[in-house]
Image (spheres, helix red, strand yellow):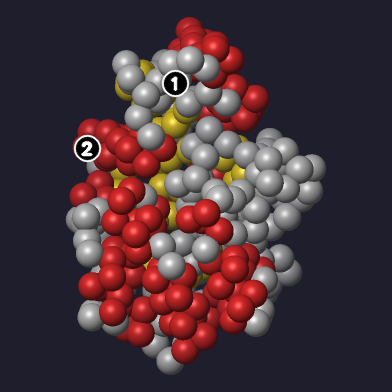
Amino acid sequence: MVNTAVLFETFARPKYARQVFEQIKKAQPKKLYFYSNKARIGYPEEMKNNEEIRSWVKEIDWDCELYTFFRDEYVDVYVSTFGAIDWVFRNEEEAIVLEDDCVPSQAFFMYCEHFLNKYKNDKRICVISGDNYVEGLDYDGADHVITSSFFMFGWASWRDRWINADFNIDVKHIIENEHIFEKYFIGDTRKVKFWKSYYKNIYDFLNKTHCWDYMFSLNCIRQKTYVVAPIEHLVQNVGIVGTHAPGKENATNKSIDLEKKNYQVTNKIINVIPNKVYDELSFNILFNYPFSLKSRMKRLVRPVVRPIKGILKYFSCYK
């Protein structure tokens, strides 16, 4: 049984959400926060799927404190996802967060609980991520890695990190005037240039939506905090298959052993600074670096023009 509260975010995709829910049922969290955005009026299939997912609360047959947040009206994905996460952290000191297409292994829950406890009072860490897209790296006996890569497809954090973030910051100001990337990626001109270009292309989008994962990541960068990542990939993003990358397995949706229950903990002490080798490899894998500047810019503007689910699904606002 999982002692940490689990947030399950849903909408109207039972095919994906069912896979996540089955893993949650096996983990049997003591506290489950079940969130559901309302289906849009005039979309019969969506309304049917939405009601089906909400009915799953009847399947909770273990000793569990169940909390539900079923919206009465539809809200856009940005308001919806932020509202769900804010709901759980307003009520819990720490929580595990799962969206409806992020299928966790059983080991993911053990991993999150261990490192939530380990880094609870270390404010240099802002997120416990369940994602690792780098294969074959020698971690020299360590059971986790510190990274500046904000992968949050199945993650955990603490209330104080969440409420300490300002989701209404002036993105243009902090990037151009506070030079947050220069201060964070010290000496790494490649990443500084890449991320400044990326965010400059989505200023208007962020000012309009305040998309939670972009804004949360920016706050962590601004505060010079980092992410804990596992030494093996623990969450499969099934929502990518069948949409913009039909049937294709890539870094973000590669298959994992969902039934593996234990995460190997070695307790080897490591420095709380980003692992540069891991960061370089993960950056290259997820963003197919290097590209020509022209090619990169074409990819950078896609989130504004057309939501993507492929290799550039670095953030999860797009559903």
Residue holding disc 2: 90
On the question of residue 170 being in view, the answer is yes
Q: Residue at 56% of width from left, 59% of height from top? A: 302
User: Residue 241: x and y, percent?
Assistant: 71, 42
User: Residue 306: x and y, percent?
Assistant: 56, 50
Q: Which mark is residue 307?
A: none
> Is residue 98 rendered to the left or right of residue 186?
right
Identify which amino acid the numbered label 2 is placed on: Arg
Q: Earlier in the sequence, mark 1 or mark 2?
A: 1
On the question of residue 222 being in view, the answer is no
Please tell me how many numbered marks the rendered image carries.
2
> Is residue 80 rendered to the left or right of residue 28?
left
Instruction: Name, please, the residue furthest toward the bottom.
Output: 187
> Quadrant location of residue 35?
top left
Badge 1 element: loop
Residue holding disc 1: 40
Badge 2 element: helix
Q: Dot 2: within a 10 Å radius of its alpha carbon, few (fewer than 14), some, or many (20 or more) residues?
A: few
> Is residue 62 rendered to the left or right of residue 204?
right
Q: Residue at 22% of width from left, 37% of height from top? A: 90
User: Residue 84: x and y, percent?
Assistant: 34, 34
The Cα atoms of the two marked residues, 1 and 2, are separated by 27 Å
> Is residue 86 rendered to the left or right of residue 104?
left
Q: As rendered, which of 161 and 204 lies closer to the eye?
A: 204
Q: Looking at the picture, does residue 245 appear above or below residue 285? A: above
Q: Looking at the picture, does residue 214 appear above or below residue 194? A: above
User: Residue 199: x and y, percent?
Assistant: 41, 68
